[in-house]
Image (tube, grey):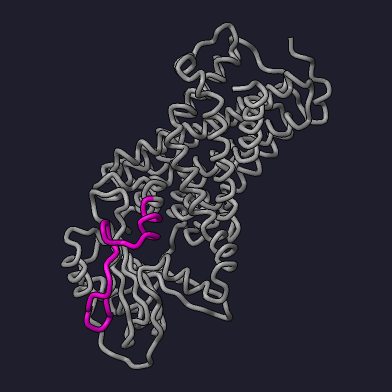
């Protein structure tokens, strides 16, 4: 490869990584914890409040209670079986789409609605992962960042492919500690390249799908755009209400029909539209084990459970055949067993944490290298400080959210748990950013990196002290607590590597500047 071409790819890889690195760090760190999203729903609730799964009769009872509380809920609603059955229904008020959520535990035995205090920790972690907790535009932003992410991956592969065999395991100091960190960055990137490629492609597909659909679809389909979107993405078109009320077959019959059509299918949710109307439809959605693209839908009439269509492995239209593996690969739920297979999700968890190290080290090396080559640089100092503030703030903030969940949920102020979880995160993020731009980067790292590790060690201990360490015997609670302890161990390990580098080579001059306005006083490196 020509030297000029190689240099262009190096510059592309560096700049694209800088632009997208911090957003990807947030998405990967939250995504690592989000691999245990189902278990986190269980962990976040006070011990003893988790309900037991409901049978068919219990699901029907819950549906009846929701319809009794709001007769219009049957227009469009979802039922989610599980530890505590949930109903999510749609309402349109003044042109705005509003979604309501009710749980089985929200209803007394007489059907009276009595909403309990709920945590939003699992949802908040998920929002950080897929939209940086930025409403509306966050998903599109992450889609565009995923495109940049893919460009950086391709550039990195072109750069390292010719020398991959020689440098793959060249994790040596070679008299230069900075070289060691560069080799570590390259090693993590090369080994986990397939994993990162999966996330770049699937993230871009999911994040940009809506944007591309609106922009390109309007040009191709014009007024027929909505119909084209419906036929391409939905298992069955939304029915129009006839105005004629008829008796419904019932949840038990719908599930029996789905089991008959796809034996062994695990039911993930049930979608009901125009329930109680003659034109009502029911979509029993779930998974068929043994396939990467495992998603399945059995659509039937609401009145008599007559089957309308099946979407399943080997029996799906082209567009569903493309979309289904994208979701499976992104969420790592193709490993078989309940919720995708624990072994596969643990691998995703570990690779996601390594990805965080990749993005962090890439930003730090860029800042140091730019200072070495071009002398004192305000842009390098700003990027280093911003990187430290965001990474430490996000890590410490999420740990505080976990701690706040347990402390507040078991206090007289349990109704403020959502505010405490999100407020704790925002407070730590702002504090880390303030420290990063006020003190030396070296001093900030010495405090915030071990502090973050201690907070992740503290979170499961607080849960154990408040709810009893015997609760760790519960598989869900034990898994989440174990993941938090693994994050703590990882951060302690990184802090140890940082201290070793400092002992052997000293700090880069960029790390010792107290304020950004004094960047001009940095001495040229020897």
Residue positioned 22% across, 78% down in the render: 306
Q: Can you give x and y, in whole percent of width and height, for residue 111 in the image?
A: 31, 79
Using the image, determine if residue 429 lies above or below residue 448: below
* Residue situated furthest front in the rendering: 2
Q: Can you give x and y, in whole percent of width and height, for residue 173 in the image?
A: 54, 10
Quadrant of image for the N terminus: top right
**Viewer-side residue, 59 vs 340:** 340
- Does residue 269 show up? yes
* Residue situated furthest bottom in the rendering: 244
* Residue situated furthest top in the rendering: 175
Horizontal side of 447 relative to 321 (left or right) equals: right
Using the image, determine if residue 217 lies above or below residue 434: below
Q: How many marks?
A: 0
- Does residue 443 show up? no
Quadrant of image for the C terminus: top right
Q: Does residue 173 belong to the magenta stretch? A: no
Residue positioned 46% across, 32% down in the render: 193
Horizontal side of 159 relative to 282 (left or right) equals: right
**Viewer-side residue, 506 vs 460:** 506
Q: Does residue 312 belong to the magenta stretch? A: yes
Question: In this picture, which residue range is highlighted in magenta?
Answer: 300-325
Residue positioned 58% across, 52% down in the render: 423
Horizontal side of 415 relative to 379 (left or right) equals: left
Using the image, determine if residue 313 lies above or below residue 203: below
Q: Can you give x and y, in whole percent of width and height, for residue 452 in the image?
A: 53, 34
Q: Could you say which quadrant of the image residue 73 lies in?
A: bottom left
Horizontal side of 165 relative to 219 (left or right) equals: left
**Viewer-side residue, 104 vs 11:** 11
Q: Can you give x and y, in whole percent of width and height, for residue 471 in the image?
A: 30, 45
């Amino acid at each position: 490869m020509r030297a000029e071409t190689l240099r262009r790819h190096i510059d592309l890889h560096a700049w694209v990584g800088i632009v997208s690195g911090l957003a990807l760090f947030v998405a990967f760190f939250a995504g690592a914890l989000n691999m245990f999203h189902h278990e986190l729903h269980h962990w976040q609730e006070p011990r003893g409040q988790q309900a037991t799964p409901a049978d068919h009769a219990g699901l029907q009872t819950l549906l009846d209670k929701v319809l009794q509380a709001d007769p219009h809920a049957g227009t469009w609603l979802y039922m989610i079986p599980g530890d505590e059955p949930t109903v999510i229904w749609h309402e349109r008020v003044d042109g705005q789409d509003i979604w309501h959520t009710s749980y089985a535990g929200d209803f007394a035995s007489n059907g009276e609605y009595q909403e309990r205090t709920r945590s939003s920790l699992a949802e908040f972690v998920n929002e950080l992962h897929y939209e940086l907790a930025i409403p509306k535009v966050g998903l599109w932003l992450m889609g565009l960042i995923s495109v940049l992410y893919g460009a950086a991956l391709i550039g990195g592969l072109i750069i390292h492919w010719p020398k991959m065999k020689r440098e793959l395991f060249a994790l040596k100091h070679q008299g230069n500690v900075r070289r060691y960190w560069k080799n570590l960055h390259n090693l993590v990137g090369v080994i986990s390249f397939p994993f990162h490629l999966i996330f770049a492609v699937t993230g871009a597909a999911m994040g940009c799908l809506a944007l591309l659909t609106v922009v390109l679809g309007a040009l191709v389909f014009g007024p027929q755009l909505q119909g084209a979107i419906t036929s391409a993405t939905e298992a069955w078109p939304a029915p129009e209400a006839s105005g004629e009320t008829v008796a419904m077959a019932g949840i038990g019959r719908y599930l029996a029909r789905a089991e008959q059509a796809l034996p062994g299918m695990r039911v993930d949710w049930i979608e009901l539209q125009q329930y109680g109307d003659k034109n009502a439809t029911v979509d029993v959605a779930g998974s068929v084990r043994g396939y990467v693209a495992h998603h399945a839908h059995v659509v039937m009439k609401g009145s008599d459970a007559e089957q309308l269509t099946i979407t399943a492995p080997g029996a799906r239209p082209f567009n569903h055949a493309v979309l289904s593996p994208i979701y499976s690969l992104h969420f790592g739920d193709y490993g078989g067993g309940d919720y995708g297979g624990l072994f596969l999700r643990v691998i995703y968890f570990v690779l996601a944490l390594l990805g965080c190290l990749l993005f962090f080290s890439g930003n730090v090396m860029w800042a140091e290298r730019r200072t070495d080559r071009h002398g004192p640089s305000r842009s390098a100092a700003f990027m280093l400080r911003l990187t430290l503030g965001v990474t430490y703030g996000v890590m410490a903030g999420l740990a505080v959210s976990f701690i706040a969940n347990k402390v507040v949920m078991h206090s007289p102020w349990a109704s403020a748990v959502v505010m405490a979880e999100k407020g704790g995160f925002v407070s730590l993020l702002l504090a880390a950013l303030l420290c990063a731009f006020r003190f030396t980067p070296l001093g900030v790292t010495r405090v915030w990196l071990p502090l973050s590790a201690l907070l992740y060690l503290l979170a499961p201990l607080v849960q154990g002290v408040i709810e009893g360490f015997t609760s760790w015997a519960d598989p869900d609670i034990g898994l989440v607590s174990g993941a938090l302890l693994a994050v703590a161990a990882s951060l302690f390990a990184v802090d140890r590597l940082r201290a070793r580098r400092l002992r052997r080579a000293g700090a880069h001059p960029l790390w010792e500047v107290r304020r950004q306005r004094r960047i001009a006083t940095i001495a040229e490196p020897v």
